[in-house]
Amino acid sequence: MAAEARQEQRTLWIVGTSVSIESGGYVAQLQAAAPDWRLRNLSVGDQTSMMGYLRVLQHRAQFARGDVVVWEYSLLDHLLTQGLFDRGDVRRARRFAWNLLRELGVGLVVLFTPPREDLGARTEIERECAEDAARMGAPWFDLRDAFAELGIDAPHKHYRDDRHPRVDSPAVARWVERLREAIAGAAAPAHALDE
């Protein structure tokens, strides 16, 4: 019976920036809130969706239909395309990765961690990601919305530096609640993206 339960346990894959590997951060909180999921964290800090795509390709054979990926790369997709990486290459890599996950029957949930300097409005990259997620039928969550829901008037005080939300922020806890609800019902995206 225990072996059957282990075989039926789905995997929650995390593919993101250093925000996704931070000690005590949203991933650790999510793991505690969703113990019925096996968690695999493929995140690599200081990288863009190009690294996310490579990580998905590297583990392609390990994904199973019904697994879910949490994608959290918009932060560095924005910051690192301001001079280091080509924005079109980053967009294509993200779309390749998301389409591959769809083909594999893997659910997708997208997270937006805004840079502290861009708390007032979504970045262009975030708007593109939100549009792509909506086209695919994948849910997405923006940390700004958690700040607004909680009535936090000074969200910049909930960051420990220019890009990392404080792990003890109530907005991160709210984000985890929303994320837990989304992964419970996440399915493979219904529609592919043009690459």
Image (cartoon, helix red, strand yellow):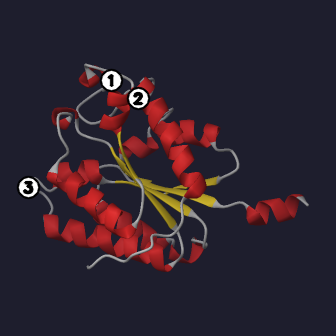
Which element carries disc 1, helix, strand or loop?
Answer: helix
Amino acid type indicated by mark 2: Ala
Task: Choose top left, top right, bottom left or bottom right for residue 115.
Answer: top left
In the picture, the disc for residue 83 is 3
Tell me which residue sits at (21%, 54%) in the image: 127
* Structural crowding at the residue carrying mark 3, measured as other residues with C-alpha within 10 Å and reported as few (<14), some (14–19) or many (≥20): few
Q: Where is residue 105 shown, x and y percent of the image? A: 54, 75
Asked if the residues shown at circle 2 and circle 1 are in contact, with their CB atoms under 8 angstroms apart, the answer is yes
In the picture, the disc for residue 72 is none
* Nearer the observer, 45 or 96: 96
Above-or-below relation of 69 to 122: below
* Distance Cα–Cα, label 3 vs label 1: 27 Å
Asked if the residues shown at circle 3 and circle 1 are in contact, with their CB atoms under 8 angstroms apart, the answer is no
Quadrant position of the N terminus in the picture: bottom right
Above-or-below relation of 173 to 50: above
Which element carries disc 3, helix, strand or loop?
Answer: loop
* Distance Cα–Cα, label 2 vs label 3: 30 Å
The earlier-in-sequence mark between 2 and 3 is 3
Question: Which residue was labeled with disc 1?
Answer: 158
Instruction: Determine if residue 43 is in view.
Output: no
Q: Furthest-right residue in view?
A: 1
* Distance Cα–Cα, label 2 vs label 1: 8 Å
Question: Which residue was labeled with disc 2?
Answer: 171
Which element carries disc 2, helix, strand or loop?
Answer: helix
Asked if the residues shown at circle 2 and circle 3 are in contact, with their CB atoms under 8 angstroms apart, the answer is no
Mark 3 vs mark 1: give the one in front: 1
Q: Is residue 102 left or right of residue 130?
A: right
The earlier-in-sequence mark between 2 and 1 is 1
Q: Furthest-left residue in view?
A: 83
Q: Where is residue 173 shown, x and y percent of the image? A: 49, 30
The earlier-in-sequence mark between 3 and 1 is 3
